[in-house]
Amino acid sequence: MRNIEVAQILREIGILLEIKGENRFRVLAYQEAARKIENWPEAVETLAEEGKLREISGIGEGLSTKIEEYLRTGKIDFLEELTKEIPRELIRLTEIPGVGPKIVRQIYSELGIVNIEQLEQAIQEHLLQNLPGLGIKSEEKIRKGIDIIKKSTGRMLLGDALPLAEEVVIFLRENTQIKKISTAGSLRRMKETIGDIDILASTVDANRMMEAFINLPMVKQIIAHGTTKSSILTYEGVQIDLRVVDNQSFGAALQYFTGSKEHNVKLREYALKKGYKINEYGIYRIDDGERRGGEKEEDIYQILGMEWIPPEMREDQGEIEAALQKRLPILVDVKDIQGDLHVHSDWSDGLVSIEEMAKAAAQKGYQYIAICDHSQGLAVASGLTPEQIQQRKKEIIHWNNNHAEIFVLEGIEANILSDGTIDLPDEVLVQLPIVVAGIHTGLGQATEKINQRLEKAFKNPYVQIISHPTGRLINKRDATQGDLALLFKYAQQTTTALEMNAQPERLDLKDIDARQASEKYQIKLVVSTDSHDTLSLNLMRLGVAQARRAWLTKNDILNTYDKDQLLQTLHKKRDRLII
């Protein structure tokens, strides 16, 4: 499959067009085409061969022709011409927090800046302060953005790494004789960001597997090629390492290469105390050198008297001690999720209708889905007025009266204003079964101000869930200056749930914070996708993975409840605070 590769090219065209100042709808067409192709279950090259590209909503003759040209020739003439006018290097500048396409266009046209090094030099010389619309504050914001992006260099989002790795695994399964195969490293542990992608396999023909691997369509450069390990660099700049091991050692190797380093060090220290040695080939008794296991990963833990430890927990955060005491929690699983409590429709800034979203959620086996469009305080996202909420209500009622496969909950993602009030009156909020609220503006305010806003929002009896509580964007924007301990205290006192937003760039709350919220404060969590299209519903697995890293069980997460139990739990806050 070349879906990710093609999506990246389309995304680059969209960014360059936006820098150029092209029509917004034209830019959106490329962005949405990229997103759909990246997540499409079929190979884009197969769709092109069969003339089915236009069956994907939003891909017309122009886009399909460009995709077919790229698949056939490896380039797109339109992109070649575009980069003569707008240097491709400028794309990197748009990744800096605080630097959008409009600013990139301005600093390129006014100062000739095309890369981060030149931008840093311009900031040192205070050249940006002289540009229209920019000033000292803007310059400082961009400087901080450069610091953030430098820290993140070489780390890709889990949401980007996972489908890329799965594409490789599928290709190898289809083209080689595999016995066993798995991702390893930080990807298998489902960390929020990934360095290199590690894949481990056993096969009847290592040479054939390695040949297939280094000839993947996504390969830009072969870094290393051998019979036990090969490494490639993709066109997106991602390094992927493939290791081939004997089948009898696969379990031991998988445990070893999954990590984390800290987990493995402690595990080996304990093994030595018990008279065993562990390496990537197996587990051995020290006194006589007898190999006791290694074909299965479970062997390692079982022989040491432990429960098998899920990969997401292997960070030396008490999991080894818990495994020895046979008290590891039964972690939440994707199959436990009964519904998504934060999705958007085309009533606000979503890309699909309520009906389309409901049908897609029903196909996932959900009992319910909450349509939480933005509210009026967020005009940039086409937030709904009270009148529009009433109009939307009719559509939701019509669906529920005519469809039994899934129940659509009427909700809202309200905006927490600068003074902490909610941007909708109570008489509107009281009519909504689900009220999610979040901070979308004023994220750079001081700690005291953020705390005051959150306290007031938590105390609102109609706010049941706080969305993306810290406001961070991974590799782009740090969390707000709010006091996390105070946030947890407010949530505990008001029985307000906190969201674990599954968008790859958010994953907010993050794992360690969610664990603290649950264990120390007994706060209930909600895992939601914040979907604006149907394909994004698949991001639930990323949110659940972070919940697993937080040691959460299904009982810790509200959207594992059935509909009646969910609504009863959410409305307890309203009933208690109003009384």
Image (cartoon, rainbow, N blue to C red):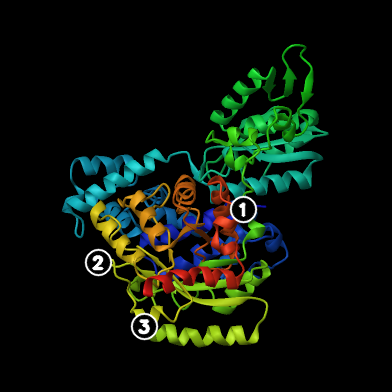
Above-or-below relation of 500 to 188: below
- Residue carrying label 1: 332
Label 3 – label 2 distance at C-alpha: 19 Å
Give percent across and percent down for residue 73. 62, 53
The residue labelled by disc 2 is: 419
Earlier in the chain: of badge 3 and badge 2, it is: 2
Mark 1 or 3 closer to N-term? 1
Of all residues, the one furthest to the top in this rendering is 287
Where residue 291 sits, quadrant-wise, is top right
Mark in front: 3 vs 2 = 3
> Within 10 angstroms of label 1, few (less than 14), some, or many (20 or more) residues?
many
Instruction: Return the x and y of residue 497 as percentages of the image width and height.
Output: 46, 61
Label 3, on which residue? 427
**Residue 60 shows in this picture:** no
Confirm or deny contact between disc 1 and disc 3 (CB under 8 A): no
* Residue drawn at the location 58% of the way across and 58% of the way down: 540
Mark 3 packing: few (<14 Cα in 10 Å), some, or many (20+)?
A: few
> Amino acid under label 1?
Val
Question: Could you tell me how many numbered marks the image carries?
Answer: 3
Mark 1 and mark 2 in contact (Cβ < 8 Å)? no
Front residue of 467 and 388: 467
